[in-house]
Amino acid sequence: MLDRRQLLGSLGAGLAAPAMAFAAGRTLDVAYVNASIWTGAPGASGRPRALGVIGDRIAAIGAEQVRAMSGKRTRVVDLQGAFVLPGFTDNHTHFLRASQALSAADLRGAASREELVRLIGASAAALRPGAWLQGGNWDHERWGGELPTHAWIDAVTLNTPVAVARQDQHMLLLNALALRLAGITRDTPDPEDGVIVRDARGEPTGVLKDGARRLVKRVIPPASDREVEDALARGAAYALSLGVTQVHNTEIDWVTQEGLRRLRKRGETDLRFYSFVPLVDWRRLADLVAAEGRGDDWVRWGGVKGLVDGSLGSRTALFHDHYVDAPDSTGIVVTKPADLKEWVTGADKAGLQVTVHAIGDAANDEILDIYAEVERTNGKRDRRFRIEHAQHLAPGAIGRFKALDVIASVQPYHAIDDGRWAINRIGAERLKGTYAFRSLLDSGARVTFGSDWPVAPLDPRQGLVAAVLRETIDGANPGGWQPQEKVSIEEALTAYTRTNAYAGFQDDRLGVLAPGFLADFVVMDADLLAIDPAGLPKTKVLRTIVGGKQRFAA
């Protein structure tokens, strides 16, 4: 075993960079050596073999600089040739909901009606009578596309109210008890922004779409502050085990925001958070920013999120043309255009960052139009508008992202999931602008990657392989689904790191490994840029470092 001095002396030449002012005359706290480092910096060449940390910052990159700044008190960590890259940021999570689901019913694997019923019954049996069964992630496409009904599950959930979500989180399945507790009957009208699915007799089947979900959510007892905080901590530990060092939380509520603020008051949260709150509440957020600022790099706020439409899987995404398999529908409007325009204008004028969920081509065109008008009204500034999902784009929309400097905040796993059945919804011709990662990048637009957890797995390795290979999860597209939209592994890594830092106004301190930047990085057992992309999900996270401290080790 080499000692510290031998390790430092054995390093080859690295990429030297001038020490930042904060590190002048100081000795490294930790030297990570014998590594293969992808810094993520634009235009960088070669692979530095060492990285040095002082406090929560990177102070040295490259063997020569690390050696020069090391001293007797420097702790040397031999990475034995492991691959190092900037920490992954996930651009879109429903973090509290997903974290709570880690200990709730998981129905993602149900491939038949019988299996769905069995899993729900087993989960209900494990609860105390009267406790609500939540979680879910069921997908009716796995058993042929038939929507489940309360009649399927009533017999196995007699004393347990059920409200379990489809994997896209735009539909809930209720049992008869939950319908009764929510007061939903044949006489209950559909809300403007949602649908109560009904049978041929007009009776509710138990499925609620989009805005109709509020009808049951209002009667589900809220989690206690302690339960919220415990769930967030569990989710953070899980994210760190996957090499995720920061998440953007895009849930439209204040519960997560307040839970994160409470956690931060107790100390470092291990995982970094950027919290978005409902667009409609932009004045409340503006008041908070004026009174308290925008938090810090552990828990930050200052962003708002709205919605134009629903989801493709629920047939509530908003399109210019009708659905192929629902010819009487073009989707639904979740937020009235006039309201959306008013709120975006106000939030932007207040200096808040705005992002809006848009799935269908009509939804994307609508929010692009609103963004353009708001810029004309409020004037030019560095606002970094985002569109969450930017999923189905009309031919003229792609170039507008670059022209308007709008960030496409996309989630690659959706492509290999929805790609199994999307053609049934909108037909082959309209798929050409679907999950158009390559086209957006080629246009010069900024594209960021994430998961939409729990809609899709949080694991960035699965997102990477989805973006690079685009092979649908059913194995039916071995050459890639809409393969013209594939991206390279380096482009995918950049979208998960440097571009996400830009999308969160942190590109001056995160997203690349460079002196002066925050020491957030991941140590992997394989070079993600060199292996067969099909092997990406099998690579192993060895260490996750956030703020200079090891927060996870395999």
Image: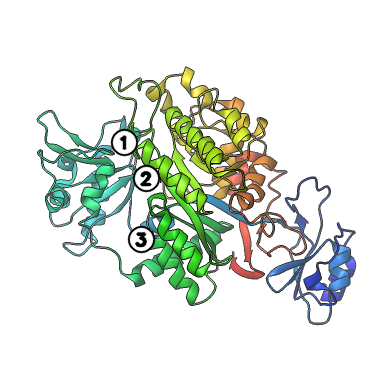
Which residue is at 37% across, 62% downward? 255
Tag 3 and tag 2, C-beta contact below 8 Å: no
Tag 1 and tag 2, C-beta contact below 8 Å: no
The kind of residue on which mark 2 rests is: Arg
Does 394 sit above or below residue 265? above
Q: Identify which residue, 186 or 132, lies in the foreground.
A: 186
Position of residue 486 in the picture relative to residue 412 (left or right): right
- As drawn, the label of residue 108 is 2
Position of residue 13 in the picture relative to residue 237 (left or right): right
| In the image, farthest residue toward the top | 429
Q: Label 2's element?
A: loop
Q: Quadrant of residue 326?
A: top left
How many residues crowd around disc 1 within 10 Å: few (fewer than 14), some, or many (20 or more)? many
Q: Label 3's element?
A: loop
Q: Of the residues under marks 1 and 2, which one precedes in the sequence?
A: 2
- Residue 544: x %, y % from top left: 62, 63
- Residue 233: x %, y % from top left: 45, 67
How many residues crowd around disc 2 within 10 Å: few (fewer than 14), some, or many (20 or more)? some
* Residue matched to label 1: 140
Q: Quadrant of residue 325?
A: top left
Q: Indicate the quadrant containing the C terminus: top left, top right, bottom left or bottom right.
A: bottom right
- Measure how far apart labels 1 and 2 are at the Cα level: 10 Å
- As drawn, the label of residue 336 is none
Residue 309 visible to an observer of this rendering = no
Position of residue 84 in the picture relative to residue 138 (left or right): right
* Residue matched to label 3: 103
The kind of residue on which mark 3 rests is: Ser
Q: Of the residues under marks 3 and 2, which one precedes in the sequence?
A: 3
The kind of residue on which mark 1 rests is: His
